[in-house]
Amino acid sequence: MPAVEMVGVSKTYRRRGGQPFRALDDLHMTVASGGVHGLLGPNGSGKTTSIRVLLGLVRPDPGAGGMLLLDRPVPAELPGVIADVGALVETPLFSPGLSGRMNLRLLAEAAGVPRSRIEECLELVDLRDRAGDRFKGYSLGMKQRLGIAAALLKAPRLLILDEPSNGLDPAGIRDVRELVRRLGHDGRTTVLVSSHLLSEVQQMCDSVTILARGRQVASGPVSEVLSRAGSGDVRVTVPDPAAAAAVLAAAGYSVSPAPDGQVLVHGAPAPGAITRVLAERGHYVEELVRVTPDLESAFLAITGGQA
Amino acid sequence: MSAATQQPKAPPGPEGTRGTGSLLRSELLRFATRRFIQVLLGLAVLGWLGAIGIGLLSFDHPTAADYAAAEANYEQALDADEQWREDCAEAAGQPTADFCGPPLQVEDFLTVQPFDLGSTAIPGAMSAAAGAAVLAFLVGATWIGAEWSNRSIVALLFWVPNRLKVMGAKLGVLAIAAAVIGLAAQAAWLAMAWILDAAAGSGRELADGFWSELLAAQGRAVLLTVLVALLGFGLANLTRNTGAALGIAFVYFAILEGMLRAFIGMAAERWSLMVNTVALVLPGGTRIYDWDAAYTAEPPSYLVTNLHGGLVVGVYAAVIVGIGVWLFARRDLQ
């Protein structure tokens, strides 16, 4: 059962006196249950709009398309499923004159969440000591952490976090990353996290959907998306790199020198064949590593450098 | 962040299930914790205490010396008053008392007056109603205006996605709060009247039907407070801004109503918010006159009854609130 499914969803914003803007364009997205799923895309690619559409804040264009949240159609059955969905969308929205704890209590009262859970969540985001302070006195990072605490109040089966690291210092970013990974692997929670920090998604997520201009351009396990966008390059370490490069070039490979006396072989679909070619000419491979592109390279390759 | 606390395996609540949430209870709590509303209510209480103080300084039992001074002034004015009343009756062609008012009395010249509950109760209740209505308008406007300002109403939709339910809870809380404000204002007036009567009361007997007329007027005043609170809420919800709602109210009462009255006359007055507000609470309603029409003794008039006033103000409130709720239910929220 997918935690989230969007099939052919479109959203067009109509601006007074301006051209209509198509924020989502026949978007298809599936988030499997369990684990951490990243939603990646350049600004204006439709990440936040897709989350808003899922949560019923924004109406999709009428007509084709459908959405499921935890296997229930939304927005029709959103009131029935919302108790299992926690969300933080963009900036946390709280009453500035009230304390962090009181802000959580107001939400907890509305949903019948016991007060003990408020303290648990404050503890979870390390905000218990400052929970009595007014929200307007919080730093950006503390506000973000309170937003995450609010999203966790319901102990949701699906946790949606839109740019959760915004405003956090490096230690805070690391803590959020650990928290998200822990939640995503507790056997109960699915986490959908959007981020513009590619390295963050790479470290945090098991799978990823990449959006560009409101459409999905890639989706799947992070490693798979990376390899799909990968170059197929292989880095070979041998005692005599120059001679080995000549052998490989003679065998039809495209090669170039690499740092530290290595040879870089481009576009090698079967790295094992490289070992055999070199061994037949007396060059024994000490190390052979497939060069994996990082998500940033993959992202730029997939989106055509729109970021 | 702490790694000690883990996500529970089941939703929180008794035996792994969530309790029954109460949006209304949550909104009541939110209302009670709203600081600006607390300040407004605090200022109202201070105003009430100030009014009691002024009343205690203004009313007193007149002494024999006060009566002697009043008698002397009365004697001096009597001849001139009698002459004026004769001239007045002759010009009007009607009995003097009907058209020119009652003759002077010694009590009219007393510089120190006792508090007379019988003649002051209704005007006092109307003043309390006016004060409560202004307060309720501010409370209604800031209640929803602040929600739009900090967008916490959007955050609430992550918990209760049914927008009509959210708006209904906020309106319900406001109606309850406005009714409490209206009741408290009228109770405060009765308490103040009791204090002034005990300290400097005239001791005159109350007329038959005094209490029934007063309590009915006070009941209508509570209704007015609720309707005006809803008007404030509706305007702030439409503009998504407390200040804009107050600005619209000011422009309407200070400029628009005057212009309509000047250009359209009595037809506009019959449907004006101000006239109908007054008509709702005043015993017997209020009569409006067409001063532009040709007349001899009295201009043509129209009685705006309590029911007429209540219905007109109620329809204004329903339309303004209804449009805001309809837009809230349909619009995209960013």
Image (cartoon, coloured by chain):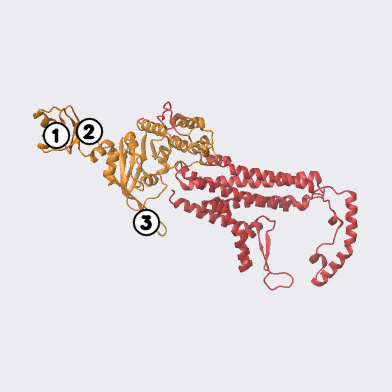
Q: Which mark is residue A245?
A: 1
Tags 1 and 3 in contact by the CB under 8 Å rule? no
Quadrant showing the N terminus of chain A: top left
Q: Is residue B229 above or below residue A170?
A: below
Q: Are the residues under badges 1 and 3 in a single subunit?
A: yes
Q: Is residue B187 above or below residue A17?
A: above
Q: Which residue is mark 2?
A: A259
Q: CA distance from mark 1 to mark 3?
A: 56 Å
Q: Nearer the viewer, residue A223 or A299?
A: A299
Disc 3: host chain: A
The answer to whether residue B241 is left or right of residue B48 is: left
Nearer-N-terminus badge (3/2): 3
Q: Are the residues under badges 2 and 1 in a single subunit?
A: yes
The amino acid beneath tag 3 is: Pro
Chain coloured orange in this rendering: A
Chain coloured red in this rendering: B
